[in-house]
Amino acid sequence: MNAQKIIFATDFSPGSQTTLAVASSLAKSTGAELLIVHCTVPPAVYGGAEMVTHLGEMDEKLSRERLAAITPHDPAVRVRRELLHGDPAKEVVDLARREKADLIVVGSHGRTGLERLLMGSVAESIVRRASCPVLTIKPQKVVGSPPAKQPK
């Protein structure tokens, strides 16, 4: 594979570490730049505009901090980070087009049935919409290990 730019889309879930490892390895082996992205979803409006603005600012600050903390294990991998806003699938696909990305790497939670119907699948939507190849990674569950804790 000859890649110049690889997008790694993260939702900050514990399983994203597996996906980051794959994306980083591909970026290192091809010499590509790794673009690490996260998309914040605008908060639902429950009060006046001031409250919504304040919640959005808090969410953006936290997201920027969490995004900055994501680093490949190999410091030789060239990294850039982007914080997007809106529908995650649409924003990641639009970024891939603008950046002329060669590959998008995204984790898949593997939801099925009613849960998938109600929640949808960001990864599936990216696969359907993207103009470049998309690699989906389903995180492995280790038998006998306790469930991973969600970051606060």
Image (cartoon, rainbow, N blue to C red):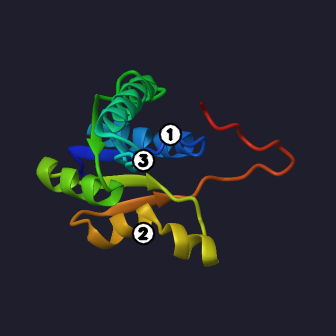
Between discs 3 and 1, the one toward the N terminus? 1
Residue type of the residue flagged with mark 2:
Glu
* Residue 34 visible to an observer of this rendering: no
Mark 2 and mark 1: span between their CA atoms?
18 Å
- Depth check, front residue: 57 or 100: 57
Identify the residue position indicated by label 1 in the image. 12
Q: Position of residue 86 (x, y in %)?
A: 29, 51
Mark 2 and mark 3: span between their CA atoms?
30 Å
Identify the residue position indicated by label 3 in the image. 46
Left or right placement of residue 19 versus residue 101 in this view? right
Q: What element carries label 1?
A: loop
Q: Is mark 2 on a helix, strand or loop?
A: helix
Residue type of the residue flagged with mark 1:
Phe
Mark 3 and mark 1: span between their CA atoms?
25 Å
Left or right placement of residue 150 versus residue 85 in this view? right
Residue type of the residue flagged with mark 3:
Tyr
Quarter of the rendering containing residue 50: top left
Quarter of the rendering containing residue 125: bottom left
Q: Residues within 10 Å of mark 3 (few under 14, many from 20)?
A: few
Answer whether labels 2 and 3 touch (C-beta < 8 Å): no
Query: Up-down: is 150 above or below 129?
Result: above
Q: Where is residue 106 in the image (x, y as percent from the top left)?
A: 43, 53
Query: Up-down: is 21 above or below 54?
Result: below
Between discs 2 and 3, the one toward the N terminus? 3
Residue located 38% across and 47% down the image: 9
Quarter of the rendering containing residue 63: top left
Identify the residue position indicated by label 2 in the image. 124
Q: Position of residue 128 (x, y in %)?
A: 32, 73
Q: Residues within 10 Å of mark 1 (few under 14, many from 20)?
A: some
Depth-wise, is mark 3 or mark 1 nearer the camera?
3
Q: Is mark 3 on a helix, strand or loop?
A: loop
